[in-house]
């Protein structure tokens, strides 16, 4: 832990805060009926995206999932444009054409969220192949869930990356559920990282609520990938604090799928609290300084909401734009 | 008659057929709790054995349906959203849709793939596509897309009893739609269209959610003295050519309305068939109303603009009078 | 002009484009040795880096093509047989065909999926299907299916230079076909049809291997005094509506010939378009000639009976004179 | 080895002989241009299909591959109807509609060969699910190659069978190649059986040229499956004596892909010779008796060719048969 500098630690914390406050705001807006479509929040999983992306350069690539807001922010995305996208506005990342599950920011190497479970995995392999082909030392990361690890695309992609020794880092965010199905029911194994062995690839398990731990594991994987050592599968054990999608409670109409002891265990492992404690204990910053940071983040999120609200709807002419080049 | 929602009608159809026939089972992602609410409540009644939650593995689950159907069961495989069938396309096309013929009649595959079709949740392109045209193209697969609670119940029950593979599409936009559904047992034969509104001047042929858009258009047109007949095909493969051709014989005008990408669509098929077999009856060029030819945008404003609308249908009908 | 085979023309196109542009690379199963012989010889010239053998993993390979194209390369992904694209359908439809639009124009995907289309090896259903209709349905994917060595070379070079995803279909039956192919550099723009035989009385619209069947039919018809124009679309998406409509304006008769299942086929699209936009020009009902509506049987006798034949085309043309 | 009775041993040998002689005949017919389509021979791999199927009951299921003739014979299929199918005749298993890559015999639980690599794997899972659902103790076996093990269908199917504890036996025929691509190049691991661990499933490696060894491994897997113990992945290390497909040499036009030392090693491990030696050494039968057996098999194969040749072509009316029930 001592290797990580204070500035990195604070950076990790701040990125996590941005995600948390952004997502909380999104949850509230959804409840108020202000956001169209489906919304899947990253609350509880912040340490994964942030820990990994902090180990990346601006020109590295990531691909993401249906639960992708956190990845965009972790990679350094613009919350104004993201919020506007969630509102379906013309000033959004995708001009209102993508929405929550299809946000991309190619300028920061964020090659897209994806509504298809597992759909982003092969795309990251292609980005890794491209980096290797072009002789850069860029790496490509793909985020995906425990549920996605049962898709054929996972298998084919990891094997392909391993055989071609590509600079790809596969980050499985194991939050214990694919929608309402527990991971332990959807697979007969405890650790998804063990699947790395099936591809002759490095595999590692990390506590996904501990941003520093994730960061250090990611740094190692990134170094190996840059050096031509090939791909790594990182399994980050994490949890989502909320439901699979916003509005879930009403949708499930009283049906329950999570155990009370599980909810209690995860409440005790909030990634922001863990990091907060670490920072204060190591005197990297004071509680007060962190609260100030938090307030600034909240202000930024609020102004993102204003930006989104005040942005125009896309106009009809845009319907036939962004088609064939 | 009691009024029920489209989703309730699906639940009833599944429950009744599972009660009726021990060989019927349900499998898919989260069918117990019902991410697609049509499967909700079945686990409580039928338990783990007959209501099987699977991993997120569309290809294997679709293929497991084939193996189960080939060996004596009558599986209903829930694949949630139409686009997820893209991952299962190989097993549906090359196995379910081909085995019986390829093996010289040895295989019988009483198998239903159930999923939601079309747009309606403003969730972006990956959750807003129509897929019926792909499966209509495959020779041995039946395709159903009902528009009312009454139809969805009767057709789903018939699909489950059918000995052929059926892609059973629920219209995503219609889940909450209410309509009369009798408590008594009934089925609706696959392949038979339903005239949802009789008319004399123009035939509007459609299916699924655009039945309502077409009915609204017919209402508008009536105000202008144009009497439109709205045919709801209900089953897309095999489809009721006779009903459509008979209607065109009467009206002399034809408009195909189909929520999907335009090219090689169901509307293309209907329009081509009418042009081929009812040319002599036609007083004007056939017309098509499809989605605009772009992926589905997220913005609700743009989504609405992409879909067939009452205005577009009215305009298409008027072109047949120009 | 030197005469070369269709396969040689493909080899030349690939080699020339790889020489011309360092960003072009080739990946797929056994592209080095060339199970699909069109890729043969490239590994010797371009080596492991640019000619990449992959595991048998169509979905990941297709998706890797997307990722590579989105980050600056111009991959050609060989998927061998048309049906194997079913396994890659999701990545082609939902990623390659949608990314640019979904992401508001951020992505540019210069990407070619190359495969063999149609029947011709008597290898049974899994190796004998046409898949062009599926990709024609997808808004942002271009689809090409050339019929001559000259066309395949010029169109493949254009497809590789195109900045959009292209499904480039080689006609399985035509690999050994010979024709004139200049040694000089040339490309053929996508989306432009070619009149393979001019005629005055009827328009036969087709693509791929059935260009030859249609030409043979035209020859037969000429003996009976019927002058048939044979239009080879070459590109299926976007397709050259103008050329077809102009021809129908002249001839007043239209026959669509398309080697594929009939329903929601390319022929359906062409026929519907003509019926919609050239109704006033038509002297007779549009006609379609497709495969018989069954999976492809193995028996060479039955395979031949399933495919469009000269006789079937002649009969369809005659129906327009009935 | 002592557990296996003499009659089983002779049965194994005879089934292998039937495959060998059948395939040799098919290869010859193909060379003479008498067979349409593609033909993939099972020569060299006989011990796998035979060893496994000898452990099955008549009512157990198998699914197969493009290289499926051997599986049909191993499961007890009719070589007349199979040969007729290869000729595309009406008397064939599939009335001439299937051909070499699409042979099925539902009467013996053979649910079909498959032209799509990996396509038969999920079907076997469904058959296993069906057996369990119906409360029988049938098992389902699927055969597939090393190449197929890199398909998404492999991954999803094994995981599905493992999570549902289905009576399915996955038999990977690792002949070292997928078409012309060496398995060692298409995956970064030595043993495909190791992938079983990724699904929490039993995995075992066996010498696929030794029918007795395969048989014993299969018996164990079948017993476990019947007893409700779930699936097993068996990797049988084998080789194909010929090319990927018949006519390969002409097709490859001089291009080579197999190492001479490899060819020599495989020549030394002919499954029929191994079994022949075993039988004679253990005095289960004499060389002469085995030769008689061989002669009888050759006669049966020849008469299958006659049967096929003398059978009528399918008539045109059959084109629209076997469609919707
Ligand atoms: C191919 C596909 N199948 C199913 C779905 C429906 N779906 C959306 S999210 C989800 C669960 C994904 O679970 P996991 O990969 O663990 O991600 P998490 O939601 O837990 O982050 C499912 C099944 C989908 N979007 N795509
Ligand atoms: C989905 C799919 N991809 C590719 C092919 C082409 N193909 C036919 S056999 C084969 C090799 C299969 O290798 P393996 O699974 O090891 O079986 P083997 O031929 O060695 O028995 C390939 C790539 C196919 N038929 N299906
Ligand atoms: Mg999860
Ligand atoms: Mg192999």
Image: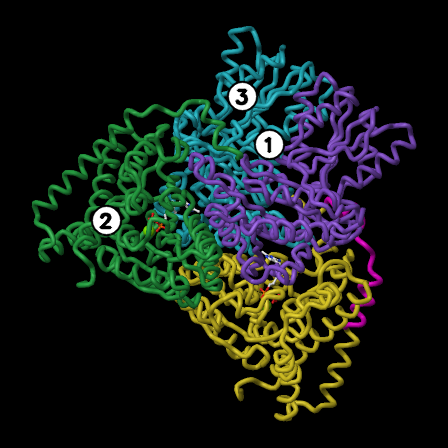
Chain colours: A yellow, B purple, C cyan, D green
**Separation of disc 3 and disc 2 at Cα?**
51 Å
Question: Residue D311 occupies which quadrant of the picture?
Answer: top left
Q: Camera-side residue: B41 or B234?
A: B41
Categorize mark 2 by other alpha carbons within 10 Å: few (<14), some (14-19), many (20+). Answer: many
In this picture, is C93 found above or below B315? below
Question: Residue D17 occupies which quadrant of the picture?
Answer: top left
Residue that badge 1 annotates: C263
Q: In what quadrant does ligand 3 lie?
A: bottom right
Chain of the residue on which disc 1 is drawn: C
Q: Camera-side residue: D172 or C54?
A: D172
Categorize mark 1 by other alpha carbons within 10 Å: few (<14), some (14-19), many (20+). Answer: many
Residue that badge 3 annotates: C196
The answer to whether residue A11 is visible is no
Secondary structure beneath label 1: loop
For the residues beneath circles 3 and 1, the answer to whether they share a chain is yes
Task: Tell me where the magenta segment starts and ends, as one range.
Answer: A301-320
Residue that badge 2 annotates: D44
Magenta stretch: helix, strand or loop mostly: helix
Q: Quadrant of the N terminus of chain D?
A: bottom left
Secondary structure beneath label 3: strand
């Amino acid at each position: 832990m001592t290797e990580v500098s204070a500035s990195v630690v604070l950076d990790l914390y701040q990125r996590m805060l941005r995600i948390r406050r952004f997502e909380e705001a999104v949850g509230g807006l959804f409840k108020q009926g202000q956001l169209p479509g489906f919304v899947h929040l990253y609350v509880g999983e912040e340490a994964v995206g942030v820990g990994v992306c902090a180990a990346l350069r601006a020109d590295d690539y990531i691909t993401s999932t249906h639960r992708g807001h956190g990845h965009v922010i972790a990679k350094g995305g613009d919350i104004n444009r993201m919020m506007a996208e969630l509102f379906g506005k013309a000033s959004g990342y995708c001009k209102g054409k993508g929405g929550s599950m299809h946000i991309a920011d190619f300028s920061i190497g964020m090659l897209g969220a994806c509504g298809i479970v597992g759909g982003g995995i092969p795309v990251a392999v292609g980005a890794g192949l491209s980096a290797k082909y072009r002789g850069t030392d860029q790496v490509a990361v793909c985020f995906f869930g425990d549920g996605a690890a049962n898709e054929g695309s996972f298998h084919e992609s990891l094997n392909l990356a391993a055989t071609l020794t590509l600079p790809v880092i596969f980050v499985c965010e194991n939050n214990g559920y694919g929608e309402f199905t527990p991971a332990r029911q959807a697979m007969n194994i405890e650790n998804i990282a063990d699947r790395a062995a099936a591809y002759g690839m490095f595999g590692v398990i990390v506590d996904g609520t501990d941003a520093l731990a994730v960061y250090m594991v990611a740094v190692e994987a990134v170094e190996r990938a840059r050096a031509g050592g090939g791909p790594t599968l990182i399994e980050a054990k994490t949890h989502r604090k909320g439901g699979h999608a916003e509005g879930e409670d009403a949708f499930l109409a009283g049906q329950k799928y999570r155990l009370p002891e599980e909810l209690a265990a995860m409440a005790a492992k909030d990634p922001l609290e863990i990091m907060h404690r670490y920072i204060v204990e190591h005197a990297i910053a004071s509680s007060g300084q962190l609260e100030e940071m938090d307030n600034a983040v909240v202000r930024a999120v609020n102004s993102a909401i204003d930006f989104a609200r005040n942005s125009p709807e896309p106009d009809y002419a845009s319907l036939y734009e962004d088609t064939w080049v | 008659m009691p009024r029920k929602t489209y989703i309730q009608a699906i639940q009833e159809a599944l429950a009744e057929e599972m009660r009726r026939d021990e060989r019927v089972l349900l499998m898919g992602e989260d069918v117990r709790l019902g991410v697609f609410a049509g499967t909700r409540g079945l686990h409580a009644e039928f338990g783990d054995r007959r209501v099987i939650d699977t991993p997120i593995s569309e290809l294997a689950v679709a293929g497991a349906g084939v193996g189960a159907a080939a060996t004596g069961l009558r599986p209903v495989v829930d694949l949630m959203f139409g686009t997820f069938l893209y991952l299962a396309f190989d097993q549906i096309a090359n196995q379910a849709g081909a085995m019986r013929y390829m093996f010289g009649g040895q295989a019988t595959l009483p198998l239903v793939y159930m999923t939601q079709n079309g747009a309606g949740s403003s969730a972006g392109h990956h959750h807003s596509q129509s897929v019926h045209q792909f499966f209509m193209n495959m020779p041995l697969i039946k395709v159903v897309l009902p528009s009312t609670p009454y139809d969805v119940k009767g057709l789903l029950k018939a699909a489950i009893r059918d000995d052929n593979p059926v892609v059973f599409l629920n219209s995503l936009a219609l889940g909450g739609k209410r309509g009369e559904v009798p408590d008594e047992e009934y089925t609706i034969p696959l392949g038979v269209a339903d005239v949802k509104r009789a008319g004399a001047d123009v035939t509007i042929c459609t299916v699924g959610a655009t039945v309502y858009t077409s009915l609204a258009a017919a209402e508008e047109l009536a105000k202008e003295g144009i009497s439109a007949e709205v045919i709801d095909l209900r089953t897309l493969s095999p489809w009721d050519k006779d009903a459509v051709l008979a209607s065109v014989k009467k009206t002399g005008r034809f408009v195909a309305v189909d929520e999907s990408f335009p090219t090689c669509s169901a509307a293309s098929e209907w329009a081509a068939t009418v042009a081929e077999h009812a040319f002599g009856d036609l007083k004007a060029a056939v017309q098509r109303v499809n989605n605009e030819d772009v992926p589905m945008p997220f913005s609700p404003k743009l989504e609405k603009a992409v879909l067939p609308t009452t205005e577009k249908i009215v305009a298409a009908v008027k072109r047949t009078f120009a």
